Image (cartoon, rainbow, N blue to C red):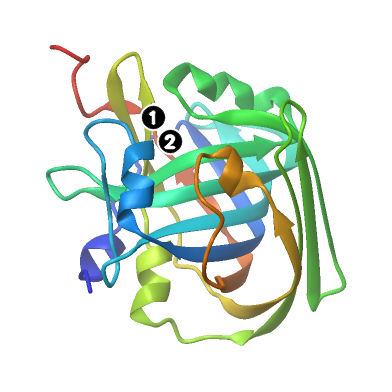
Amino acid sequence: MDGVPSHCDRRRVSAPLLTVYWRQQTMLHWRYPARAVQPLLPQGLVVDEFDGSAWVSLTPLVMACAQGLGLVPLPRHTFLETNLRTYVRLDNGDSGLWFFSLDVTTPLMLTARAVGVPYQLADLSFTTDGVDRRHTGRRRHGDATYELTVRQGGFIDQAPLDKWLTCRWAAYTHHAGRLWQTRVQHEPWRFRRGAILTMKQSLTHAAGLEPPQTEPLVHTSPGVGPVRIGWPHPVTGPKGA
């Protein structure tokens, strides 16, 4: 098992590019062979493993924007997002997330494609009665879809795997031959354990992954915020430099 503490060392984001709130997260985490994930990563990133396995997570959520460009207020804007991600590290040991896809209901976020963030427009929905949550999504370009219903249990004391999956304070993108790192800062998560009632999805297939072969670990959360998202900065030089 890889050590957990290094993933939980938060770093302050002093001058955020964007401040948001993440609400109503549902997280499905699948175990994968590292050899199935590594070919999908850019040069410079390696699979981060827990107990000898890579992990891939599907995460629908509600996002509310609060501030942009430091302290500039943004128009009140709440939208849905669904991301598919895996867990990675640099050669120097810095760990974070690699997003295979980020589906959103607003074009506001598409400007982040400029540094390689794989946002795509999608028709997403979320409903809940306070116990059961239902998420659906259909990408506007392509045939990637999902339907998911999860029943929430009680709040949990987080085990090492729970912390390893969720104590992540950076994300990586690839653009113009470089790897870019974006740091985030927020308070610790509070999680409930969840149970899947219904699920079908093709997001993993669209990302180039084989269908999951195991049942997922399921978390739900009321959310965290404010989330301070830093400015992207390059961590590798242009290819061939």
Decide if residue 97 is on the left or right side of residue 19: left
The image quarter containing residue 55 is bottom left
Count of residue discs: 2
| For residue 58, above or below residue 105 | below
Image quadrant where one finds the C terminus? top left
Picture coordinates of residue 37 (x, y %)? 37, 48
Picture coordinates of residue 11 (x, y %)? 28, 51
Marks 2 and 1 close (CB-CB < 8 Å): yes
Rendered image: mark on residue 192: none
Going by the numbered disc 1, the residue's amino acid type is: Trp
Q: Give the structural element (helix, strand or loop) at label 2.
A: loop
Q: Is residue 4 visible?
A: yes
Residue closest to the eye, 78 or 91: 91
How many residues crowd mark 2 within 10 Å: few (<14), some (14–19), many (20+)? many
- Foreground mark, 2 or 1, reads 1
Residue at numbered disc 2: 16
| For residue 147, above or below residue 177 | below
Q: Earlier in the sequence, mark 2 or mark 1?
A: 2
The image quarter containing residue 131 is bottom right
Going by the numbered disc 2, the residue's amino acid type is: Pro
Q: Is residue 12 visible?
A: no
Decide if residue 214 is on the left or right side of residue 8: right
Decide if residue 90 is on the left or right side of residue 224: left
Picture coordinates of residue 151 (x, y %)? 74, 78
Q: Measuring 69% from the left and 53% from the top, which residue is drawn there?
A: 201
Q: Measuring 34% from the left and 13% from the top, which residue is drawn there?
A: 176
Residue at numbered disc 1: 231
How many residues crowd mark 1 within 10 Å: few (<14), some (14–19), many (20+)? some
